[in-house]
Amino acid sequence: MAETRVSRAERQRQTRERLIEVAREMFLAVGYAGTSLDKVAVEAGFSKGAVYSNFAGKEELCMAALDVIHAEKIRLVQQVFTEETSLEARLKSFVEWSRSGLGEPQWTALEVEFAAVARHNPWVASELVKRHREVRRLIGQLISATIEEADLETTIPVEHVATALLALGAGLGGLRALDPKVDPDVFGVVLAGLVRPRRGTDGAQ
């Protein structure tokens, strides 16, 4: 009996992952409005009932798809900032990542379209707020660890730096989605301007 339960749980996990994978491709290709649960079910090889047994509706499915995208982006950023290199090298790697990681037209368009749903859906709004706060927390952790290792400090509180960088990233993403020539080097410039050598404990500034 235990083996049957595990088998069912595994099948459900595989079904859920397949639905998210297909939904992600569709949401990116044709947008939130252009994607239907019927189309996702057919493309994934399941019934519409399988979709509803895993997700309450299209909003929850889109949130799950965006979670996968965000997890990938965060993993890459964490990878850049935990490299065994100098701070300057990490900033350079981060800017290089931002050239392809920010402003992807399909991803940016989906983020904007789904954010608009939050105006009329309190659940979407609250879930997006939770995720934005978590991203800011993770950015703050990365900044704190990086500047500590480099014996630097931020010119404003770390949480404010994290908020500023998240806002800058969102804004740059939107701009680059429309105009790929927008230079992402501003990321490194802004971050470099928000840190300074740590003030000595002997009173030196």
Image (cartoon, rainbow, N blue to C red):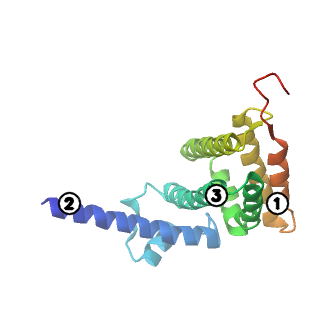
Badge 3 is on which residue? 83
> Amino acid under label 3?
Glu
Q: Nearer the viewer, residue 122 or 188?
A: 188
Residue 132: percent from left, percent from top: 63, 45
> Amino acid under label 1?
Pro
N-terminal of the two: label 2 or label 1?
2
Label 1 or label 3, whichever lies nearer to me, is 3
Mark drawn on residue 135? none
Sort mark 2 into few (<14), some (14-19) or many (20+) by Cα contacts within 10 Å.
few
Q: Residue furthest left?
A: 1
Residue 134 at least partly seen: yes
Label 2 or label 3, whichever lies nearer to me, is 3
Q: Evaluate if marks 1 and 3 touch, with contact meaning CB atoms under 8 Å apart.
A: no
Badge 2 is on which residue? 5
Local SS, label 3 = loop
Q: Is residue 172 placed above or below 28 in the rendered structure?
A: above
Q: Is residue 26 placed above or below 89 in the rendered structure?
A: below
N-terminal of the two: label 2 or label 3?
2
Q: Evaluate if marks 2 and 3 touch, with contact meaning CB atoms under 8 Å apart.
A: no
Residue at horizontal 36 percent and vertical 68 percent from the top = 14
Residue 15: percent from left, percent from top: 37, 68
Residue at horizontal 61 percent and vertical 63 percent from the top = 32
Snapshot quadrant of residue 72: bottom right
N-terminal of the two: label 1 or label 3?
3
Q: Is residue 69 placed above or below 163 in the rendered structure?
A: below
Q: CA distance from mark 2 to mark 3?
A: 42 Å
Local SS, label 2 = helix
Local SS, label 1 = loop
Residue 200: percent from left, percent from top: 78, 28
Badge 1 is on which residue? 184
Residue at horizontal 76 percent and vertical 65 percent from the top = 96
Q: Nearer the viewer, residue 89 or 180?
A: 89
